[in-house]
Amino acid sequence: EVQLVESGGGLVQPGRSLRLSCAASGFTFDDYAMHWVRQAPGKGLEWVSGISWNSGSIGYADSVKGRFTISRDNAKNSLYLQMNSLRAEDTALYYCAKGYNWNSATFDYWGQGTLVTVSS
Amino acid sequence: DIQMTQSPSSLSASVGDRVTITCQASQDISNYLNWYQQKPGKAPKLLIYDASNLETGVPSRFSGSGSGTDFTFTISSLQPEDIATYYCQQYDNLRVLTFGGGTKVEIK
């Protein structure tokens, strides 16, 4: 059974940093692209960042480019999101999502999310 | 950037009704279009991929069609468990992708 478990969320002040993690199990992690998708309270879905199976292809939404860094450790079956210079508008539930294949932007499994609140 | 215009933003229909949601892309995206269902308090779930392919295990009352810039998602006979918000999502590759604004489906 595919499982994606996010962690690392919490309350953080504007301008500070936070690192999210996603622990994956139930599939061969290094065969698949992985993504972060967020959802602000009461709002729609917003793709944040994606990374191919071998980290050779990486993408970011314009809203986080230059502030967020996605990475993965295939030996640890883990996905990360380093978030710097956080803003109030980054407040959201952050989902980890599995790609359909090694380079896919179709999300076939999602975690339950970790909540990030940026506030002073 | 490619913009996705999804409509309506909400709808109310009776059990058994046919429900249709549309998504329009600001430029040609071929068939690179997916549909997700999100129930309250839950993570989204993939229903349709590549515009018209039904994900494994998804009931056949759900379907998708379209290519280029205009896409349609249909529930052939609305069921109580279909109450959710539905999102379209376009992708060029894993570096360029956007979601539509969502359609909240309620029972009349």
Image (tube, rainbow, N blue to C red):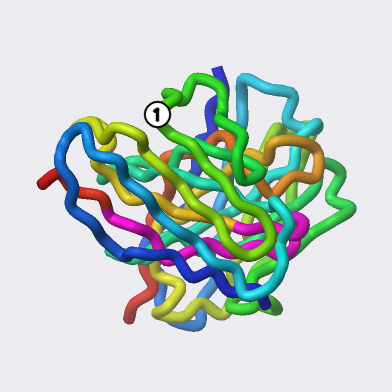
Above/below status of B74 relative to A39: above
Above/below status of B51 relative to A23: below
Q: Is residue B3 visible?
A: yes
Residue at 74% from the left image edge and 43% from the top image edge: A33
Residue at 43% from the left image edge and 34% from the top image edge: B62
Hey, which quadrant is residue A13 in on the image? bottom left
Residue highlighted by disc 1: B61
Left or right for B35, reference B104: right
Above/below status of B89 relative to A60: above
Residue at 72% from the left image edge and 33% from the top image edge: A76
In this view, the residue in front, A11 or A116, is: A116
Left or right for A40, reference B88: left
Q: Is residue A82 visible?
A: no
Hey, which quadrant is residue A93 in on the image? bottom left
Magenta region: B90-104
Determine if the magenta segment contains residue B91: yes
Q: Amino acid at mark 1?
A: Arg
In this view, the residue in front, A65 or B83, is: B83
Residue at 56% from the left image edge and 29% from the top image edge: B55
- Where does the image place residue B96, in percent across and percent down from the top left? 71, 65
Left or right for B38, reference A20: left
Is the residue marked by circle 1 packed among few (<14), some (14-19), or many (20+) residues within 10 Å? few
The total number of labels drawn is: 1
Query: On the rendered image, what quadrant is the N terminus of chain B found in?
Result: bottom right
- Where does the image place residue B4, in percent across and percent down from the top left? 54, 69
Q: Main secondary structure of the magenta part?
A: strand
- Where does the image place residue A112, in percent across and percent down from the top left? 41, 40
- Chain ID of residue with mark 1: B
The kind of secondary structure element at disc 1 is: loop
